[in-house]
Image: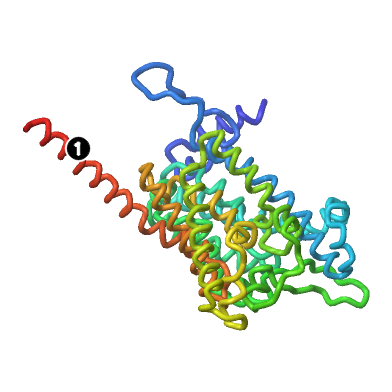
Amino acid sequence: MGLKQNLHKLKEKYKGTKMAPAFNALHTFLYTPNETTHSGAHVRVVDDLKRTMNTVIMALIPCLIFGIFNAGYQHYAAIDNALRLDPLGNFFTWDNFILGAWKVLPLVIISYGVGLGVEFIFAIIKKHEVEEGYLVTGMLVPLIVPIDIPLWMLTVAVIFGVIIGKEVFGGTGMNILNPALTIRAFLFFAYPTWMSGDKVWVEGAQAMAGQPDAISGETILGTLAANSHPVYSVWDMFWGFIPGSVGETSTFLIIIGALFLIFTKIGSWRIMLSAVLGALAMGLIFNGIVDQGWIEDGSKFYGLMSEPFWQHLIIGSAAFAIVYMATDPVTASQTNKGKWIYGFLIGFMGIMIRVFNPAYPEGFMLSILLLNVFAPTIDHYVIQGNIKKRMKRLKVKAA
């Protein structure tokens, strides 16, 4: 007897009990539900929430694989700096992959295991079906945290993020904050020394002859915030051969993922484009301030403020946040005009926070969470504005 038949029997056996949502979730995750609509007045589309989430995961897989290679590469490049002279030739090696997988895959396992465990527990307690919303969150979390984050910290953060950021609001589709960013914000405020400073990146954790167990270093944002100049070229930054959180380094792969999400109509191109424009606008303003001499070299703001405005998009988490975080359909603005405003403010404020917060030189997490809160307000005023325009047209016709 096949797995599908066994799962169906378990569903029937536990139907009406507390365990029913757990078996239903496993069955519908692996197979099409047995109960489907065949007639009647229903809107019919080829996708559902599960397929939508799987599409986003497919767009994230290249970033995950690249992040695994990059973990190993950064480790060995820190030991032998000569490897950076030919990053492409020394990047895709089995040594890099094995070391990277040893560090990255536990983050993925903890994220999915703990997060889905909490989802199943709440489904059983509240007697409702398990939603597929955590499928994407579970993949995003290991991609936006430092590779050396202790697993117990990640466990605590995932529990907090799923419960406080999602379940207390009613589950998938009801949350007002992006759950993955809620988890990252918890880590940042609860364990700041692990999320910023010189512990933001650890290239590896294998003891080597004459080397410590772990090698710590700063990201490019940390270097610029300290008024130092990074040793990486623009192409290194674009392709992703740089330190950073697991999935945020390769702007090239993030652009590919963005095009895939836009082509499949999962991600909003309006939010992506407007966020890029907002970031460029804020970057241009800061470059203008430096050019006018209002900020002198040596100021604690000078490093990031003098960075070429366009280069902000290929360092830090700017590109990753804009493509995969800002476009979350639940927490983003829903109206077309609202999406333009929402995205522009995310990019504009993200660069502003990045520059004015040298202790934590990354602002897109905070800007997206802030705009998550204001997204309903933006949509409200957009809708009210449309209503007023229609009322004016009615009055003109009536006259």
Quadrant of the rendering where the N terminus is positioned: top right
Q: Is residue 57 above or below residue 77?
A: above
Q: Position of residue 148 (x, y in %)?
A: 70, 68
Can the viewer see residue 4? Answer: yes
Quadrant hosting residue 144: bottom right
Q: Which kind of residue does numbered mark 1 sit on?
A: Arg
Horizontal and vertical percent position of residue 328: 48, 48
Decide: few, some or many residues near mark 1? Use Cα within 10 Å; few <14, some 14-19, many ≥20: few
Looking at this view, is 313 or 383 the one in front?
313
The figure's colour scheme reads rainbow
- Depicted 6 relative to depicted 246: above or below: above
Horizontal side of residue 209 vs 172, given as left or right: right
Q: Nearer the viewer, residue 219 or 143?
A: 219
**Which residue bears the numbered disc 1?**
390
Q: In the image, is 325 to the left or to the right of 345?
A: right
Q: Which quadrant is home to the C terminus? A: top left
User: Which residue is at 87% across, 55% downward?
Assistant: 90
Evaluate whether residue 162 shows in this view: no
Q: Is residue 91 above or below residue 355?
A: above
Q: Position of residue 340 (x, y in %)?
A: 41, 48
Q: Residue furthest right?
A: 209
Q: Which residue appears farthest toward the bottom when viewing the image? A: 298
Residue lying at 39% horizontally and 16% vertically, measured from the top left: 39
- Mark 1 residue element: helix
